[in-house]
Amino acid sequence: MDVMPQQDPESGRPPEPSPQDPYVMPAEGATAVPPPPPTLRTTLRRAAFGAVAAGVLLAGALVAVEDGDGDGPKEPGPVERAEAATTAGSPASLSDLTALIGDRQKWVESHPEDAPSLATLGTAYVEWARRSADTAYYARAEETLKRSLEARAGERGNGEAWVGLAALANARHDFLAAKRWGETVKKQQPKAWSVYPVLIDAYTGLGDQKAATAATEKFGELRKGVPALARTAELYRGQGWREDALATAREAADRATQPAEKAEALHRLGELAWERGEPEEAVAQFDAALRTDAGHHASLAGRARALVALERTDEALAAYQSALEKLPRPEYALELGELYESLGLDGDARTQYTGLREMAAGAKRAGVDESLLLARFEADHGDPDEAVELLRGQWRKQHRSAAVADALGWALHRAGKSEEGLEYAEQAVGTGVRNASYAYHLGMIQRELEDYGPARRNLEQAVRTNPAFSPLAAPLARQALEALGEPPPGGPGDMQPPPPPPAPEPKPEPKPKREAGRETEREAERETERKTKPEAPAAPSKSPAPAPAASKEAAAGSAAPAEGGASKSP
């Protein structure tokens, strides 16, 4: 049998392909690949290869490496470890991922028509780009996945390449394309668990909570274990079910066995602690993640964020700088710039903001849409009108997540359109997610619109959820609360309706003729009875004596004028 060579990486970076490498091309974007045909027949069952990764989404067949000496099982090498993580749907370490990429690159040089190996390599490029912030690998991923489909069409069983294209589209923030690819695979093979993680990401990016929930539940049915727990924890987190999210994330961390999987679970616990306003716990979890897997660079940025809240500023600056060096993501440049700005270091802040623009421009050349991040930056530090235009474009593309709704509402407010922004800010908070920034934005918009009761409640919610949610915005939230003052006794004024005006005293209305006649008749009977009664009866009788006939006639006579409507005094 053909043996795929196993290669230990000399560095943490995947080997560079030669200039003649057929898998390198200019970035075109995930949607540059023709979308799948609308009607396809289920043929994926003909595929003779293993399941696609859900964690790193590495697709393809697992080709065994023969043991030359036959003395028993060998200790798994980095390629085998990466393949095992792939089969389990868990993330592989960066070093193992590097080894797998080098191994498959060498293999496809001599086997250019091996569709599953090409799909594996293409999806490995996607994962490497995502976890290293090296967006140049997205172009390689796209070309390699297209070559896989040329070698074997998706309709003929190459669903691995379609799932890889969905992962690429998600990484480029093209959630509609990711949804199309993923739903094509799901229609053909609904029990293929490997397609559900990319669908969850696509639905979440589009703000379709119902579909994301259904996909998460289906993934949990088909793939038990840590990957399903991790996805479920994220679902709970997005719905604001903090206790459920924490319990599920802890279970995932307890059950994780491989370093990369364990580090990812610990990182999630750190993020949950940070969002709850518990920075000490967050630092402990991020430190544990880094001890477990030193290559989990996202935990460096999480640690820096929590150190800011603990006022360990020098350590926070060092952690941010290290994170940007190892994982140059534009959102980290924005966070570091705002930290510098809060310290009055405007020059350093401008340097970071310039770096942010450069990183976003490089990502755009690689087909990555960073409109949401750029809009957040422009709203607070640049041109709010530009932020509005960027976010309106996202909304037209059906990117309607809570993050986009919040950013659009805030950008409209900053551009002087608070009434329009209110609708989007309310939609973001209405998803249930417990995000201090969302509550802050909504509260400030309501304050601008002089809706002081709700404004106070949302600003209080922001500082109660996470008192240090932003080095710039958190102090502004507290200042706004102080300016609003305490609510009036008895509750907010807008909840106490003014007392109604006193009603005018009703004028006496004449009784109906029939009733007036009856009253006059009863008075006449009582007067006649009084005149005919003995002056000093020995004892009252139990039943009054009947009135004499004369009295009845007199009563009838005196009642007659009343029925005519003209009663006279006797």
Image (cartoon, helix red, strand yellow):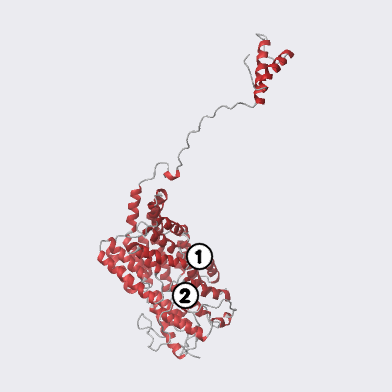
Q: Residue at x 33, y 74 (%)?
A: 326
Using the rendered view, name the quadrant where residue 419 is placed. bottom left
Q: Where is mark 1, residue-wise?
A: 208
The reply to whether residue 81 is in sight is no
Q: Earlier in the sequence, mark 2 or mark 1?
A: 2
Q: Residue at x 48, y 77 (%)?
A: 165
415 shown above or below 192: above
**Along the line of sight, the residue nearer the viewer: 528 or 472:** 528
The reply to whether residue 498 is in sight is yes
Mark 1: give few (<14), some (14-19) or many (20+) Cα within 10 Å: some
Q: Secondary structure at mark 2?
A: helix
426 shown above or below 132: above
**Along the line of sight, the residue nearer the viewer: 115 or 135:** 135
Q: Amino acid at mark 2?
A: Ala
Give left or right: position of 310 versus 49. left
Q: Secondary structure at mark 1?
A: loop
Q: CA distance from mark 2 to mark 1?
A: 18 Å
Image quarter of the C terminus:
top right
Q: Amino acid at mark 1?
A: Asp
Residue with the most extreme top position: 535
Residue with the most extreme right position: 549
Q: Position of residue 45 (x, y in %)?
A: 58, 80
Q: Position of residue 515 (x, y in %)?
A: 65, 25
Q: Position of residue 109 (x, y in %)?
A: 44, 89
The numbered disc on residue 167 is 2
Would you say the residues marked 2 and 1 are in contact, meaning their CB atoms lie under 8 Å apart? no
Q: Position of residue 190 (x, y in %)?
A: 57, 73
Mark 2: give few (<14), some (14-19) or many (20+) Cα within 10 Å: many
